[in-house]
């Protein structure tokens, strides 16, 4: 029996389904987390063969001892995974320390975690990228800005989501940012791109070939959602655009992706600009894990399938026979606490009760980017989905 260690299987709280499908495929699933066993969801407890609680997943020595304990009890570890951006580097170090060859190693982290290091691999794939400058001092930054113009975007070179991401519109904004920025964070500055975000989401086998593909569209940037406290809107597409599919597959090859669930983000330009024409697809960043929050569930709804099983099949068998069924648009709306809406939560849920698949509160840890109260629904056409959005955020 193969042994798989799953790091933090309780967060996000839908990740127990990865564990369930792994166990159903005959793997021994060993969880490591900082939540007491008795506080884990019943479904998760039933999906684990064993569990080791640490006081903090940030404490590498504790997590190291947990893996060593499992090796002592069950033998060598075949897979170690978290499917979580935050733990990618720790996952890689654990694999190195315990000679687990399935998955990224520490030397892979620069190209998959640092935005500046991603750009050569995108260029190798033939995909254009935004011009950039590593933030240094005022004169250095202004030299770059004189080339690309205001506004510019600054964000951590190694960061998750839109945390510490800012849009600078003037020299005063730049001075303020330089005086207040965290000195321990390395920032990248990029030219501003007028675009919507289109993603390529796929489960990739050991040969670097997709066994499942879909994508989403984010009309509102996560940066604006987080910094301006906007409501959140995005949707899983009914049919993946062929230019996004081509860009995604090219990036998979360039980055050397094997045996992973990935979420690659691209800009689709909404007007002509120096880097391309309206409609062109341009690189944003790669994420070597599933799209966040309840996106895996939304992929299931949009494709009448089960990505948790497809991923577990990839781990166990390097292939999947899980079919994709009837497709639709699956829309997400996250309403922000403290905002007034023309239609109440209760009215919205009642009016769209036949379309809605999930209505709930988001965990506080995800609410900054996703909103506090979420509504996820399936719609046969983009027009029907947009009619829902018109009511949901009015």
Image: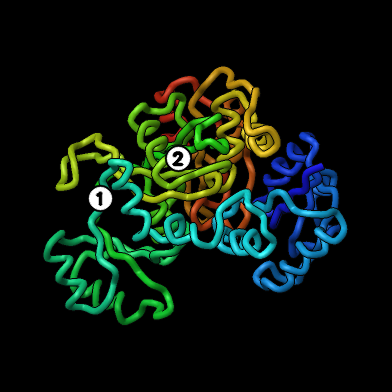
Residue in the image at 68% along x and 37% along y: 312
- In this rendered view, identify the residue nearer to me: 256 or 288: 256
| Comes first in the chain, label 1 or label 2 | 1
Residue matched to label 1 = 193
* 108 in relation to 19, above or below: below
Other-residue count near label 1 (Cα within 10 Å), few / some / many at <14 / 14–19 / ≥20: many
The quarter holding residue 212 reads: top right
Farthest residue, direction left: 146
Other residues around mark 2 within 10 Å, as few (<14) / some (14–19) / many (≥20): many
Name the image quarter holding residue 38.
Answer: bottom right
In this image, 220 relative to 313: left or right?
left
Q: Which mark is residue 234?
A: 2
Q: Quick check: 254 left or right of 274?
A: right
Q: Is residue 144 left or right of residue 79?
A: left
Residue 230 image offset from top left, x and y in percent: 42, 53
Q: Position of residue 306 (x, y in %)?
A: 64, 30
**Which residue corresponds to the image point at 41% horizontal and 25% vertical from the top-left?**
382
Which residue is at the front of the view, 352 or 89?
89
Q: Position of residue 299 (x, y in %)?
A: 56, 33
On screen, residue 82 above or below 60: above
Extreme residue toward the top, this view: 326
Q: Is residue 203 visible?
A: no
Q: Quadrant of the N terminus?
A: top right
Looking at the rendered structure, the secondary structure element under dot 1 is: loop
Can residue 8 be seen from the camera position used here? yes
Disc number lying in front (1 or 2): 1
Image height of 46 relative to 77, above or below: above
**Chosen colour scheme:** rainbow
Residue that appears at 82% across and 54% down: 75
Question: Dot 2: what SS?
Answer: strand
């Amino acid at each position: 029996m193969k042994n798989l260690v799953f790091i933090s299987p309780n967060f996000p709280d839908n990740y127990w389904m990865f564990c369930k499908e792994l166990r159903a495929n005959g793997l021994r699933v060993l969880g490591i987390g900082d939540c007491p066993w008795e506080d884990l969801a019943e479904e998760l407890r039933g999906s684990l063969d064993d569990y080791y609680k640490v006081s903090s997943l940030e404490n590498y020595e504790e997590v190291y001892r947990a893996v060593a304990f499992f090796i002592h009890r069950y033998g060598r570890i075949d897979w170690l995974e978290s499917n979580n951006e935050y733990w990618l580097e720790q996952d890689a170090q654990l694999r190195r320390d315990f000679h687990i060859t399935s998955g990224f190693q520490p030397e892979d982290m620069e190209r998959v975690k640092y935005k500046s290091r991603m750009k050569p691999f995108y260029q190798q794939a033939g995909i254009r990228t935004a011009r950039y400058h590593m933030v240094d001092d005022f004169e250095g930054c202004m030299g770059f800005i004189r080339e690309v113009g205001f506004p510019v975007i600054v964000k951590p070179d190694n960061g998750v989501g839109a945390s510490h991401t800012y849009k600078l519109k003037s020299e005063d904004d730049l001075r303020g940012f330089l005086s207040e920025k965290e000195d321990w964070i390395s920032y990248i500055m990029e030219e501003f791109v007028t675009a919507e975000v289109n993603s390529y989401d796929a489960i990739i086998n050991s040969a670097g070939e997709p066994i499942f593909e879909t994508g989403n569209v984010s009309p509102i940037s996560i940066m604006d959602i987080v910094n301006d406290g906007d409501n959140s809107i995005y949707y899983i597409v009914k049919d993946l655009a062929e230019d996004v599919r081509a860009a995604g597959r090219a990036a998979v090859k360039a980055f050397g992706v094997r045996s992973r669930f990935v979420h690659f983000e691209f800009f689709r330009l909404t007007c002509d600009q120096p880097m391309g024409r309206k409609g062109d697809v341009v690189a944003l960043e790669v994420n070597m894990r599933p799209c966040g929050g309840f996106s895996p569930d939304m992929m299931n709804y949009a494709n009448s399938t089960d990505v948790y099983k497809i991923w577990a099949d990839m781990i166990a068998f390097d292939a999947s026979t899980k079919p994709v069924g009837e497709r639709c648009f699956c829309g997400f709306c996250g309403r922000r606490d403290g905002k007034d809406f023309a239609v109440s939560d209760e009215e919205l849920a009642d009016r769209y009760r036949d379309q809605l698949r999930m209505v709930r509160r988001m965990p506080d840890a995800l609410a900054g980017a996703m909103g506090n109260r979420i509504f996820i629904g399936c719609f046969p056409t983009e027009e029907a989905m947009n009619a829902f959005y018109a009511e949901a955020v009015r």
